[in-house]
Amino acid sequence: MESGDPPATWHGLPLLLLLLLPPSHEGRAVRHTLPRQRTQDRPALHLSNGPGQEPVTIMTFNLTKIIKTSSSFEFRTWDPEGVIFYGDTNPEDDWFVLGLQDGRPEIQLHNHWAQLTVGAGPRLDDGRWHQMEVKILGDSVMLGVDGEEVLHLRQVSGPLAGKPQPIMRSALGVLLFPASKLRLPLVPTLDGCLHRDDWLDQQAQTSASVPTSLRSCAVESQPGIFFLPGTGAEFSLQDIPWPHEEPWAFSLDLRLQLAAGSGHLLALGSPENPSWLSLQLQDQKVVLSSVSGPGLDLPLVLGITLQLKLTVSRVVLSQGTKKEILALPPMGPGSLLNLWAQTQGRLFLGALPGEASSASFCLDGLWAQGQRLDVDRALSRSQDIWTHSCPQSPGNGTDTTH
């Protein structure tokens, strides 16, 4: 190309993105030592403030004063999906997201040079601490995990100081625009912890909000869904797997790892009548009842799957070799089947609306018709629910603040 010719611009052409795998030697990745850039060891921050959450913290930076263009931190989660951090100079046309998708790091970015979504690196949803670094060098963005460079994107950025808007915002654990604006779908809320963090150039930081993490990260955790007393979630029956039609049948399976107190574990109903059929925790027993009359119970055994099998005429509650059968009233306008025929049918988990429940419990898993349900995708839920983790002992789950 002669010097008088225009440079190879991106206007009207597909973006040429060079995604470089780390250099290797004899099939082994070359280890890149990431700098341990930590201004101080602050208490670890929990990244989720619940659905519709406020950011854990927001920082702003003056790009004209930035010298160091990397950020590093350590991160721990059991959650396979969500936002770790978001940054922008303009939420319309210059933004960046680092998150997890299927447990692996994912970058989504949108700017004048590139619009892309790319995932790389190992699964990080194993409950261990992992060191991460994001670095901007010239036109490149690099992602490092545990000392290894796992992604190198070229021709996707420009000089930070040359951006039209000199102020950049960075938010932890949340997006600063609707999730619908992402290039590919991602559930933003992330049940994870972050510490030993160092963001860009501290000399260029112009403001930082006070962290508002709702939970302590000091508690040792295990995978699961943890309901504190008084917390609950609800799913629309239209949004979960439907019953088998001929013959009509529906199943719910749940496995409890921790349980204490008394109150609802789950219920099928509607906003007007939330407990048409309910399963409650009482004195280390599970009690199954319906609006039609007396219920039945089984001793609670932790770690063994509880199963509810519903038919037109009965509900079978079983755990291991033990089984109880609850008869249902004849079909009519108020029958169980009618819950699926109306848009208001609900599956409630945990405390019902307005219930003064003392029950706290850890669900190791919850399945409808054999498919695992994700509380992040519930119609609504309490912000204090731990969506992908549980304390390892009941007493450790009561403190949700630092």
Image: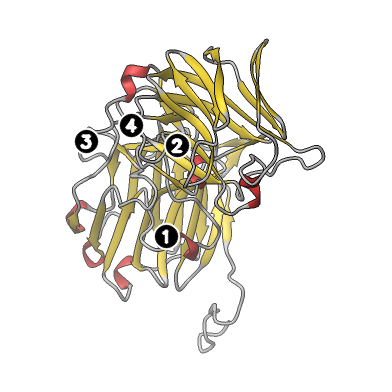
Which residue type does callout 3 highlight? Arg
Marks 1/4 in contact by CB < 8 Å: the verdict is: no
Q: Is residue 255 visible?
A: no
Give the residue at mark 2. 387
The answer for how far apart the CA atoms under marks 2 and 3 are is: 24 Å
Residue under label 1, please give it.
96
Residue 197: x, y in percent? 29, 41
Distance from label 1 to label 4 (Cα)? 42 Å
Marks 2 & 3, CB-CB < 8 Å contact = no
Task: Decide: is 261 above or below 128.
Answer: above
Q: Disc 3 to disc 4, how far (Cα)?
A: 36 Å
- List the residue tagged with mark 3: 42
Badge 4 marks a residue whose secondary structure is loop
Task: Indicate the quadrant containing the C terminus: top left, top right, bottom left or bottom right.
Answer: top left
Residue 47 in the image: state x and y as whole percent: 35, 42
Q: Is residue 322 left or right of residue 182?
A: right
Of the image marks 4 and 2, the number of the one nearer the N terminus: 4
- CA distance separating discs 4 and 2: 21 Å
- In which quadrant of the rendered view does residue 315 lie? top right
* Neighbour tally class for label 2: few under 14, some 14-19, many 20 plus, Cα within 10 Å: many
The secondary element bearing badge 2 is classed as: loop
**Do the residues under discs 3 and 4 have CB atoms within 8 angstroms?**
no
